[in-house]
Amino acid sequence: MADTKKVAKKATEKIDKKDLYSQIDQFLSDKDNQVKTFNKGDIVEGDVVDVREGMVIVDIGYKSEGIVAGRELKSETLDWRELKPGDKVLVYVVKPEDEEGQLILSIRRTQQASIWLTLDKAKKENDIVETVVVEANNGGLIVEIGKGIRGFIPTSQLDASRVYLDGVRQVGKDISSKVQKRLNSLVGDKIQTRIIELDREKNRIILSEKMVTQSRDLEQREKTLSKVKEGDVLEGTVSGITPFGVFVNAEGLEGLVHLSELSWDKVEDIGSLYSVGSKVNVMVIGVSDGGKRVAYSVKRLLKDPWAEAIAKYKIGDVVKGKVQKVVPYGAFVRITGGLNGLIHISELSDKLVKDPADIVKVDQEVDVKILSISSTERHLGLSLKGAKQGAVKEEKEVVVEEKPEVTQEELADAVETALEEELGEKK
C-alpha cells in the first residue's frame, strides 16, 4: 500500500512539473509578457508615468521606464508641461541604455523623425515635396523641408528657365558667376520637388525640380502624341535655346525647331529672336521613335519672301547689293529684297584675281549682274565684272545715239550738193 502511494506521488510530481513548464512556455510566448527590445531611432507610443521639473518619465514597455529631459522635451507641437500621468505620448528612442542603465527618450526628435517617415513615403510614392530655399552654393540650392530637415537641389536638377536667363547651358567663368547670382536670388523662394535620394543615417536628401516640371507635361504629352500628325499647327512655349535651334514644348510635346527651320532668312543670333518662355506657333514636320524625336518648323508658317522677291528680277538684270562676306573663292552679296548671292572669284574682274579682298570689302555697295537664279538653293549667281561690262556697253550705245549713222540717201544728196557747188565756182 505504501509503495502504491509513493508511485502515485511521483506521478503527480511529474504531471505538476510538466504543467508548470507548459504554463511558463505559454507565459513567455504571450507578447504582452515579453520584455520588449528597442533600437536607437525607434518611435514608439508610451504612457506618461510622472512629470517633474525638467523631466518626464515614460513607460514604453521596456525593462525600465524611460526619461525625457533637457532639450529633448522641446517640441513645436507639444508642451511637455501640460502632460500628466496616464497621457499617451509619442517618443523617440535616443539610447536604449546609457552608462547608468537608463532608457533615454526624446519628444523633440519625434517631430524630425515623423518628417523622415513622411519623406520616405513621398519617395516611394513619387509625391511632390515642397521646399523653401535657404542657401545657395556653386553646386545648387540648400532647401528646408521641415523644421531642422534640409535637402539639396543640384543645379542640374533645377528647371533651366529658373537658372539660365536664355535657357542655354554653358560653361565658363563669366557664365558661372551669372548662374551663381541667379541662384542667390532664389533664397526664400518655394520650389516643388521630388526625391532622388534619401538616406536618414547620412542625413542626405537629394531633390529634383525637373522631375516635377517634366512630369506635369506627361499626361498632356501622351494625349497630344495620340492625335498629332505632320502638318498640324500647335501653340507652344520655348523651353530651351541651343546653338543649333530652339526646343519648344507644344501642348506637352517637346520638340526641336532646327536652325534651318526658324526663318526663311539666315539666322545669325537665335537669342535675338527668342528667349525661354516665349510663345510661338509651330508646324509639326516630323514625329519618330514613339515621340522621342519631334521636329517642328516656324518658317513654314511664314510667307516665303523668296518667291515674291525673286519675281522682280530676271537673268541679266544689273542690281545694287552690299558685300556681306569675303571668302577665298569670292564674295557673298545681299541685294534688295533680302536675296543672297555669290560673286565667284572668276566674276570679280577681267583680270586674274588672287585674293577677292583686293577687289571688294565687307559692307561695300556694289552693282552686280544676275547670272543665274536657283530656286532650290534659294541663291543667285552674280557677277561684278559683268555689271561693269554692261555699263561700258551702255555708255558706248549712248555715244552712238548722239552721232547717228548717215543713211545712203543722205550721203548721195550731200555728194551731189558738193559737186554742184564746185562746178558753180569754176564758172
Image (tube, rainbow, N blue to C red):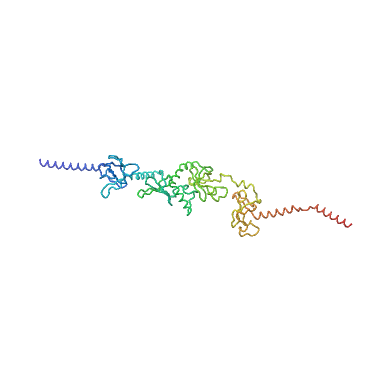
Q: State the residue in front, 271 or 285.
A: 271
Q: Is residue 332 left or right of residue 203?
A: right
Measured along the vertical axis of the image, is residue 385 above or below residue 186?
below
Across and down, in percent, residue 137 comes to 42, 51
| Residue 332 image point, x, y percent | 60, 54
Q: How many marks?
A: 0
- Nearer to us in this view, 135 or 218: 135
Q: Is residue 22 left or right of residue 356?
A: left
Residue, far left: 1
**Quadrant where the N terminus is found in the figure:** top left
Report the side of 127 relative to 240 (left or right): left
Query: Residue 198: image x %, image y %?
Result: 38, 48
Taking the view exactly as shown, the residue that stands out farthest to the front is 53
x then y, percent, for residue 114? 35, 44
Instruction: Assign the C terminus to one quadrant of the image.
Output: bottom right
